[in-house]
Amino acid sequence: MILQQLNPIACKTYLLKKEDQTDIILIDPVITYVPDYINMMEENGWKLTYVIDTHTHADHISGGRLLKDLTGCDYVMHEKAPAQCVTMRISNGSEMELNGIKVKFYETFGHTMDSVSLVVGDALLTGDALFLDEGGAARDDLPGGSPAEHWKTLQFYKTLSEKLVVFPAHDYHERKPSSLKIQKESNPHLKVKSETEFIHYLDSMQLGAAEWMKDVLKANYKCAREGDAAWIPKDNKACEIKGQSKNEEEGMLVPHITANELIEKQKQGDSSFFLLDVREPVELREELGHIEGITNIPLGSLPIRIHELDAKKEQPILVVCRSGARAEVAAGFMRKNGFNKVQVLKGGMLEYRRIR
Ligand SMILES: [Fe+2]
């Protein structure tokens, strides 16, 4: 069995697969990295069959909904998860074979009321219910959080085999996964002696305001499929995902042009942009229509059809979709594949039609 962490940031996404199989599972995918996950699958000939969120996330937009839409995989969460796009719901003690891999789910509430931990072989994937070492665990003060439930969860972890190795959904200091035995000695959350002491311990943390996290929660409740569905601060230590287009200095900017700017260019007969619409073909025939002469490659087909655009690599490309969200994902994917002059139509066809 292969269990591999994928993201270069503090938000961890795990790939789970059998060595000799091509079907894969992704656990806690982050929407910004969906193009990377798709690229990885394409390169390796892998097929995504399940995406699992350990809980409703408050510090990044989940990639679960978008991956489900793009690949047709099942989206697995706890039965109490508010997201309606979940296709497979599990409860405490659910044991299932996913792609031939035995996965056991346990309710580990506290950080949220839909948190689960997974036991897979010798691995214990704890989501945010338990981090590594002095990282403790995630906060309990957001909607759905409960220190009392978290206390119960921590006591539950103490009943599991000490040999299990903890793989959390976050780590901010490049800590290495280690056993529950080591965590009992090094993790302050597991060292607290009583529930009262635990609640005092949480109170002493002074975590500060988290208003933006409530918006992220809401976006995930609604199964957002856009990376900018909620604003996420740039200096967010919790997770380095940005709510806006990323910074050029970081090499990941996806510049926007507005519908007004595009219309102005069209009026001036400026045809320097190659226009790419990443909606489904049927959408181009619907009410919003499409920009005349535009090339249509749906987002889901982009990984296998991107070579059709090879001749355009040095040309400015404007990516268009309904609202700008799919275009953002497509543009990010294209930039990773050497299309350095790609831009996104801000607000998509909705905004374009509102003006024109
Ligand atoms: Fe979380």
Image (cartoon, rainbow, N blue to C red):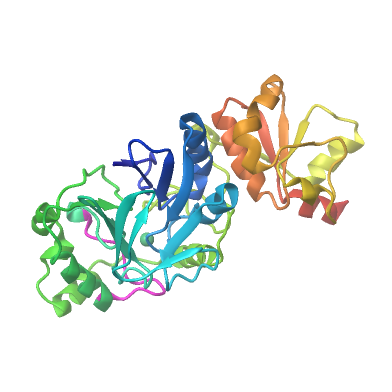
Tally the marks: 0
Against 319, is 189 above or below? below
Q: Identify which residue is drawn at 23% across, 50% down.
A: 121
Residue 32, percent from left and from top:
51, 45
Q: Please state, as top left, top right, bottom left or bottom right, where the N terminus lies in the image.
A: top left
User: Which of the 4 quarters of the picture holds residue 331?
Assistant: top right
- Front residue of 348/210: it is 348
Q: Identify which residue is drawn at 77% across, 54% down.
A: 350
Residue 104, percent from left and from top:
29, 60
Residue 144 in magenta stretch:
yes
Please say whether residue 61 is visible from this viewpoint. no
Span shown in magenta? 135-147
**192 to the left or right of 89:** left
**300 to the left or right of 48:** right
Prevalent SS, magenta region: loop
Residue 294 in magenta stretch:
no
**136 to the left or right of 214:** left
Q: Identify which residue is drawn at 55% across, 62% down.
A: 223
- Front residue of 336/199: it is 336
Please say whether residue 299 is visible from this viewpoint. yes
